[in-house]
Amino acid sequence: MKKFIIYILLIVASKNYAQELNLPVWTQYLADNDFVVSPTYAGIGDNVRIRVNGLTQWVGIKNAPDNQALYADFRIANRDGVGISLYNDKNGNTRQKGVKISYAHHLILDYTSRQFLSLGLSYNLNSFRVDIENFETDYENPVLDPYVTDDRSTSNNNFDVGALYRYGGFYFSFNLNNLLDKDIDDYTGIEPSLLRNYQIYSGYVIQSKTNKRVEFEPSVFYQLFSSDNRSSTDINFKYRKYNRKEDYYWVGVSYRFLNDQFFNPLNIGPMAGIMKSGFYFAYSYQITTNDLAGYNSGTHMITLGFDFLQGLSNCSCTDGRILF
């Protein structure tokens, strides 16, 4: 009975991101990798930026969700950027893999006040399958379902669009993901064809009045899924300190909740990261606060990164750091 309860909770809780044919968004974007959230961030910065991310959810529960991803973006010319995202996601006996290719164009709205507008577009190719070779019989089910004869694999093509507005230390991005409806089997009718979801990411970088090398960054990330109108919000805060060589470290915290359950968070936890001579490392720990809390030790995420091939742009719209 205990195993059955855990299984049901896994299905319900993982539904927040699994099988949406989209890159799962946890706190990867907070590891100084806004490109995770939106294609509009492609090319913002003065170098090639690569981030490799590994996330293990609900450590201690067998076959719990596990995700690996690679993100890379860089600027081409002065006002354009391109990027690519690859991910591999495992949840029990389900497998998802995907690639996202992105393009962004950056515009100057007002040079003096540093107002910029970025527009982005992504093409997504995703695949999903059921890993039936791992199916096992038990006392109650001594024979596997004879109708399950393959991996039930399927693929999906889709597009994302986004817009990003920046004004000094303030930023606001709006993204529309999975523009196209999914082509499903009309005879089954057990999965949604509407995969569209909306994301808003906004925050403000505040420079300390007593130390110009210190920054505070409150931010919020909002997701709304059209299929069932469920939505969630992240409230985040980061402290960042630079040295004279522009290396830095940061610490922060993130609080995620369903929008009708503010005082009952899905996850809450600390984060920290460091950039040294172009090498980046970050770690995030999320405490599970729902009914699964008694069965696992939380969710762990590690991000490794490299920034290289530095080359300044003539356009201030691609500056990576806020200049106060």
Image: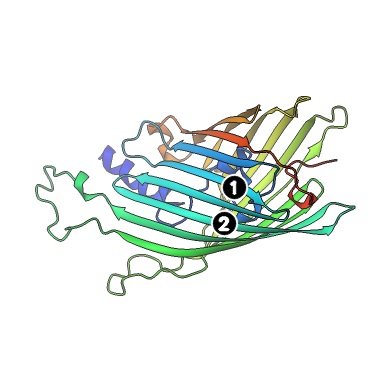
Q: Residue furthest bottom?
A: 186
Which amino acid does the dot numbered 2 rest on?
Ser
> Can residue 228 be seen in the rendering of this structure?
no
Q: Quadrant of the N terminus?
A: top left
Cβ atoms at labels 2 and 1 below 8 Å apart = yes
- Badge 1, how many Cα within 10 Å: few under 14, some, many 20+? many
Q: Earlier in the sequence, mark 2 or mark 1?
A: 1
Colouring mode (rainbow / by chain / secondary structure / one colour): rainbow
Circle on res. 102: 2
Binning the other alpha carbons within 10 Å of mark 2 as few (below 14), some (14 to 19) or many (20 upward) gives many
Query: Which mark, residue 22?
Result: none
Above or below for 190 versus 235? below
The residue lying at 24 percent from left, 55 percent from top is 151
**Rendering coords of residue 153 (x, y %):** 29, 58
Q: From the viewer's perspective, is 245 left or right of 174?
A: right
Identify the residue at image location x=41%, y=48%: 14
Residue nearest the observer in this picture, 148 or 307: 307
* 59 relative to 223 in the view: left or right: left
Report the residue at 46% width, 32% height from top: 298
Cα distance, mark 2 to mark 1?
Answer: 9 Å
Q: Measured from the top left, where is residue 142 in percent x and y?
A: 9, 47
List the residue tagged with mark 1. 73
Q: Is residue 294 above or below residue 235?
A: above
Quadrant position of the C terminus in the picture: top right
SS at circle 2:
strand
